[in-house]
Structures are given as structure tokens and as C-alpha cells.
């Protein structure tokens, strides 16, 4: 980013996007900061949704940096592209990822389009990720230098066109250094805690959010090993594969806890087992992914790659076998725990993120006695 550009900075009101704007300002770019108003808790969802404070903090940072600040209303787009996707997935028993969809459809979708329509050359965010030019043209998406904060996983479904317009100014920084820069510059967000909530909704518990929009549909909690009913659940959409807390059945006399191993549509049953390595359906050796999206040339022949099965998990060795029509079979060199349908598999070549796909089904270990990890 040596040449001066006109850049729209997505300001969340947090320290990461604040320092992203600071660095771009120091590099001499023509900046405008913008807060994306995606959600204002208008439906009285239970939880902390500090959108007004975030706007005030983002404006205060822009004032400190001497740059223009705007609020861009994307609430309708957010409802149609993220909230609808989220609720539809949970209604169908899947485990969707709203943060990844928010990046693809909102930040680098309609927000990027708004930026281009208003004369901006690029959109910058506070993601811990790096974008590097390729010798033959185009750009590579690289993990953030701070492996404890790396957020490249959440960018897995971006296209090359979206990546071309993206700027990630803080991707080379460790978090402590970023906070030091914020404090030295006198940014009002320097000591602000990181948000842990749903993308641009806030610190709202997912169960509280779902309770407002998805009707309860009670059913039995069944032990997968012997089909014994252990209790009742309020709705399958409140649970995900691998969940250990809040299931609603106590540990046994040996203090062994239960874990969710599947969902069964025939009788609306939540399947559980003791949280052990041989729990039926808990560990998978293969998975099928669909809706593949590449930020580079698509992989069209079988080859070894690496996959990140979920955020915070390390990359693991896989055999990637394309099947056409945007689907592929993935064989893991080591069994993986709790691959829930609807979640995202990020595809890697070392630190470089190539793209990603959505889990549609998985195959448990043969010892589990099950033929498919997809119970719905």
C-alpha cells in the first residue's frame, strides 16, 4: 500500500479497527471511517448490544485522527443476508457461522459495493490477516502474524475480487504491540475490551437470540449407545455436535459427562453419549463439503492440503478430493472431533488460505458403528 489510496475504513468502535485507521493515516492515505449499522436490538433480544456506544467510540477515534466519520445503514441487507441465513440454518438443524457470512455478504459485499459507488478504491478492516501480491497477479490471503489472534478463518469464503479490494493494516502486528500503538496515539479505544458477540449484533448469547425467532420443538434426549431416553430437550436448534455444557442431563455415578453426538429427525431426538474417544459419531475421519469458494484458482484434482476445521483449531493434514459442482470429499489424516453440518472448513497451503467450504456430512470412525455423521 505504498501509493496513496482513497480507503473506507470499517470502524467497529473497537481497538483493532481504530489502529487500522491510525496506520493508514500515518501511511498518507485518504481516509473516511464508517460504522456499519447492521443491528440495533430493535426486537428486544436479551443481551448486551452496545451499538450506540460503538458508534460514539468510532466517531471519537475519527475525531482524534482528523478524518471524516459516517454511519452506513445496512440493516435491511444484514437481515436478508446474515440473519435469515442464520435462522434458516438453525431451523434445519445445522450450525451456521454468521461471522464468516457477515464478512462475505456485508463487509466485503454490500459495504464494499457502497464504498465503490462512493469513489473509494478499497475497504479496510481490523482483521488479523495479511494480503500479499502474487508474482503472476492477484493476491494471496495469509494468516495473521499473531497466531493467538489470527482471523483468516473468518475470511475463508472471500473471492479474489473481494480480496483485491480488501486492506488488512494490522495483520502484521501482535495484539500487545497494537494496544501500545493505540495508547501512544491517544486513541479513546486503546484499553477497550474485545467484543465476543455475534458479528455486529453484540454480546448476545446465541440461545437467547434463537429463542426470539425459532419456535421451540421439544423432543427426547437419547443415549446413542442403547437408545435409552435420558430426558427432554426444548429444541434441536439449541444444540450442536460436540456440545458438553447445558445439555440437560446429569453426569453418571462415575462423573462421566455426556456430549452431543448427533440429531435424529425421525423422532426429533437429541443423541448423546459419554464424552470418550469412542463416543459414537463424535470423531470423524472424512467429511463432504459443498459451496466451495476459492480466492485462488480452484483445486480440481485430488491433492494433499491442510484444513482448519474451526476457528482456534490448528491446521491439520487432509487429502482433498474434488467431486465437481462445488463439492469435495475430505479425508483427515487424523480423526477430527465434532464436525457439525453447516460449519466451515478453511482450506490451506501452509499459512496461505486458499478458500473454504461448508460441511454437509461427515463419516464417523468405523468403531462407532454408525455410517454417517449426518443425522438430519
Image (cartoon, rainbow, N blue to C red):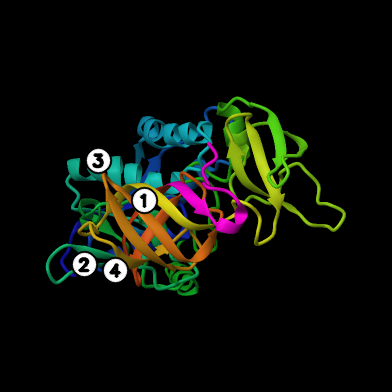
Does the CB distance between marks 3 and 1 fall below 8 Å? Answer: no
> Which residue lies at the image location 62% right of the left edge and 41% below the top edge?
239
Q: Which residue is mark 1?
A: 357
Q: Which is more foreground, mark 2 or mark 1?
A: 1
Instruction: Give the vertical position of 261 relative to 316 (above or below).
Output: above
Q: Is residue 190 left or right of residue 255?
A: left
| Of pointers 4 and 1, the one earlier in the residue sequence | 4
Disc 2 to disc 1, C-alpha distance: 30 Å
Q: Is residue 294 left or right of residue 12?
A: left
Disc 4 to disc 2, C-alpha distance: 12 Å
* Numbered circle sitting on residue 114: 3
Q: Please tell me in which quadrant of the rendered image residue 306 appears.
A: bottom left
Q: Percent from the top left, x then y, of residue 359? A: 43, 48
Q: Secondary structure at mark 2?
A: loop
Q: Quadrant of the N terminus?
A: bottom left
Query: Can you see residue 128?
Result: no
Instruction: Give the vertical position of 231 relative to 356 (above or below).
Output: above
Q: Which residue is mark 2?
A: 1
Q: Secondary structure at mark 3?
A: helix
Does the CB distance between marks 4 and 3 fall below 8 Å? Answer: no
Residue span colored magenta? 360-376
Q: Which is more foreground, mark 4 or mark 2?
A: 2
Query: Badge 4: few (under 14), some or many (20 or more) residues near its Cα, within 10 Å?
Result: few
Q: Percent from the top left, x then y, of residue 59? A: 41, 49
| Of pointers 2 and 1, the one earlier in the residue sequence | 2
Q: Is residue 53 left or right of residue 25?
A: right
Q: Which residue is mark 4?
A: 26
Pick out the residue farthest to the left: 136
Q: Please tell me in which quadrant of the rendered image residue 256 appears.
A: bottom right
Amino acid at each position: 500500500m505504498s501509493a496513496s489510496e482513497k480507503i473506507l475504513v470499517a470502524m467497529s468502535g473497537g481497538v483493532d479497527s481504530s489502529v487500522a485507521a491510525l496506520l493508514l493515516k500515518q501511511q498518507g492515505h485518504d481516509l473516511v471511517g464508517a460504522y456499519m449499522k447492521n443491528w440495533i436490538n430493535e426486537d428486544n433480544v436479551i443481551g448486551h448490544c452496545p451499538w450506540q456506544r460503538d458508534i460514539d467510540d468510532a466517531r471519537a477515534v475519527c475525531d482524534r485522527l482528523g478524518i471524516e466519520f459516517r454511519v452506513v445503514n445496512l440493516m435491511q441487507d444484514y437481515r436478508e443476508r446474515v440473519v435469515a441465513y442464520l435462522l434458516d440454518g438453525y431451523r434445519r438443524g445445522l450450525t451456521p457461522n454468521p461471522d464468516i457470512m457477515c464478512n462475505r455478504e456485508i463487509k466485503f459485499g454490500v459495504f464494499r459495493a457502497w464504498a465503490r459507488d462512493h469513489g473509494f478504491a478499497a475497504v479496510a478492516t481490523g482483521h488479523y490477516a495479511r494480503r500479499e501480491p502474487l508474482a503472476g497477479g492477484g493476491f494471496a490471503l495469509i494468516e495473521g502474524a499473531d497466531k493467538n489472534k489470527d482471523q483468516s478463518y473468518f475470511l475463508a469464503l472471500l473471492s479474489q475480487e473481494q480480496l483485491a479490494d480488501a486492506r488488512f493494516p494490522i495483520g502484521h502486528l501482535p495484539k500487545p504491540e497494537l494496544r501500545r500503538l493505540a495508547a501512544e496515539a491517544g486513541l479513546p479505544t486503546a484499553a477497550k475490551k474485545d467484543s465476543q458477540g455475534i458479528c455486529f449484533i453484540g454480546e448476545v448469547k446465541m440461545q437467547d437470540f434463537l429463542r426470539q425467532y425459532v419456535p421451540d420443538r421439544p423432543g427426547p434426549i437419547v443415549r446413542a449407545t442403547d437408545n435409552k431416553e435420558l430426558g427432554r430437550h426444548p429444541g434441536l436448534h439449541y444444540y450442536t455436535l460436540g456440545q458438553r455444557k447445558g445439555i440437560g442431563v446429569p453426569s453418571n455415578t462415575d462423573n462421566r459427562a455426556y456430549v452431543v453426538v448427533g440429531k435424529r429427525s425421525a423422532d426429533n431426538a437429541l443423541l448423546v453419549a459419554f464424552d470418550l474417544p469412542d463416543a459414537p459419531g463424535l470423531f470423524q475421519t472424512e467429511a463432504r463439503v459443498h459451496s466451495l469458494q476459492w480466492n485462488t484458482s480452484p483445486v480440481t484434482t485430488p491433492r494433499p492440503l491442510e484444513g482448519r476445521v474451526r476457528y482456534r483449531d490448528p491446521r491439520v493434514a487432509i487429502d482433498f478430493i474434488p467431486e465437481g459442482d462445488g463439492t469435495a470429499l475430505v479425508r483427515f489424516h487424523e480423526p477430527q472431533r465434532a464436525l457439525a453440518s453447516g460449519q466451515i472448513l478453511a482450506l490451506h497451503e501452509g499459512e496461505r488460505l486458499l478458500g473454504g467450504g461448508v460441511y454437509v456430512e461427515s463419516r464417523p470412525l468405523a468403531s462407532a458403528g454408525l455410517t454417517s455423521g449426518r443425522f438430519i
